[in-house]
Image (spheres, rainbow, N blue to C red):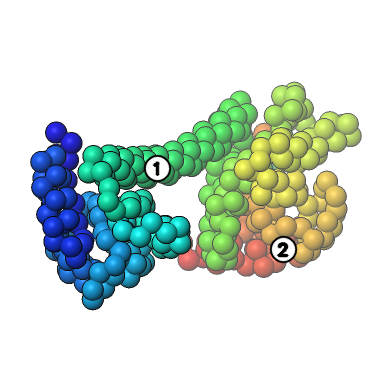
Amino acid sequence: MNGSGTKILIVDDEESLRSLIEIYLSNNNYEVISASNGREALEKIDRDKPEIIVSDIMMPEMDGYELLGILKGSAEYSDIPVIMLTSMDEDMDKIHGLSAGADDYMTKPFNMEELLLRIEKLLFLKRRIAGAEYRFTESQKLLDLTKEELLKAHKQLKKIMLESLEGLVTALEARDKYTRGHSERVAAYAGGIAREMNLDNIDTIIIAARLHDIGKIGVRDNILYKGEKLTKEEKAIIEAHPVKGAEIIGKISFLRDIVPAVKYHHERYDGTGFPEGLRGDEIPLAAKIIAVADTFDAITTDRPYRKGLDFDHALNELQGNAGTQFDPVVIEYFLKILNTK
Ligand SMILES: [Fe+2]
């Protein structure tokens, strides 16, 4: 019953009392270790790792206060509950003992049964604390796991969202044989230029390129795919697509970075583009890169009104418009990639 083999250390210089406690606790199934002073107690603690200590105060060599001080100051042993025993029933001793970190206090002479009850109570508390600490650590682990899973889910959600938007653009372009696959090619060219320029936002530029024409979703097919010349009103509707696109993208928090690239991909280097007529470095670099990639794809693929030009002609056209329509630096990098292929 009771102790079920729990190791307990009794520290007292009075041998008769020590033996008495030892017999009583052994009878209650404790494994009793004993020491006659603080120094000896420390050796036994190191060797036998008791779960609880009952210690006298006044002892030769090292008294109970010093022992207590060492134990409570050590990282390894500060959790071992200590019951202090003394023959002095002075309030100051109790206060001294408790403030030094004693977990309980008994005055000699004491009732053995009461000592046993106090030991059991402290052991129960100690185990309960250990259990709570264990549960706390486990819940912390669980929380970390949940955080990790949340991040994963968030990443997944972003991926799905992006895929849906790309799907929309693909569907939009697939309705017309001349624009089929356009944004995917633009994304590939823009990504290539960004890499060649050694930019640190390559992924953002690729996503922006993939979605640059998403604003065309609001434009009716009969205008969007009209072969012949557009009226002034129709032209205005088409030219609203970068702003419409920026509005759509701007509503999606994780895509806000690409809004400027989408909004300004039809600006021209010389300031004659739309929607705002920005010029030179006022135009975000990502937008200028997409503009080059966009035009390159447009002139190398078939259009309703003409056959697609070959690469050399396309390059000549791009070069011819460097400094007017396009940023010459972006053209330079684009030519560099194409010439090395
Ligand atoms: Fe566009």
128 horizontally vs 274: left or right: left
Circle 1 packing at 10 Å, graded few (<14), some (14-19), many (20+), is few
Q: Would you say 269 lies left or right of 143 here?
A: right
Q: Which mark lies nearer to you, 1 or 2? A: 1
Q: Position of residue 140 (x, y in %)?
A: 41, 44
Residue 131 seen anywhere in this rendered image of the structure: no
The residue shown at (71%, 36%) is 251
Would you say the beta carbon of the disc 1 residue lies within 8 angstroms of ligand 1?
Answer: no
Asked where in the image residue 34 lies, by quadrant, the reply is: bottom left
Q: Please name the residue shown 85% across and 50% down the image.
A: 276
User: In the depicted view, which residue is nearer to us: 2 or 95?
Assistant: 95
Give the SS element for disc 1.
helix
Label 2 beta carbon within 8 A of ligand 1: no
Q: Mark on residue 327?
A: 2
- Between the C-alphas of marks 1 and 2, the distance is 59 Å
Amino acid type indicated by mark 1: Phe
**Residue 281 found in image quarter:** bottom right
Quadrant occupied by the N terminus: top left
| Label 2 element class | loop
Mark positioned earlier in the residue sequence (1 or 2): 1
**Residue 281 horizontal side relative to residue 103, left or right:** right
Query: Residue under circle 1?
Result: 136
The numbered mark at residue 151 is none
What amino acid does circle 2 point to?
Asp
Q: Residues within 10 Å of mark 2 (few under 14, many from 20)?
A: many
Residue 130 spot, x, y in % from top left = 32, 45
Residue displayed at 62% across by 43% down:
254
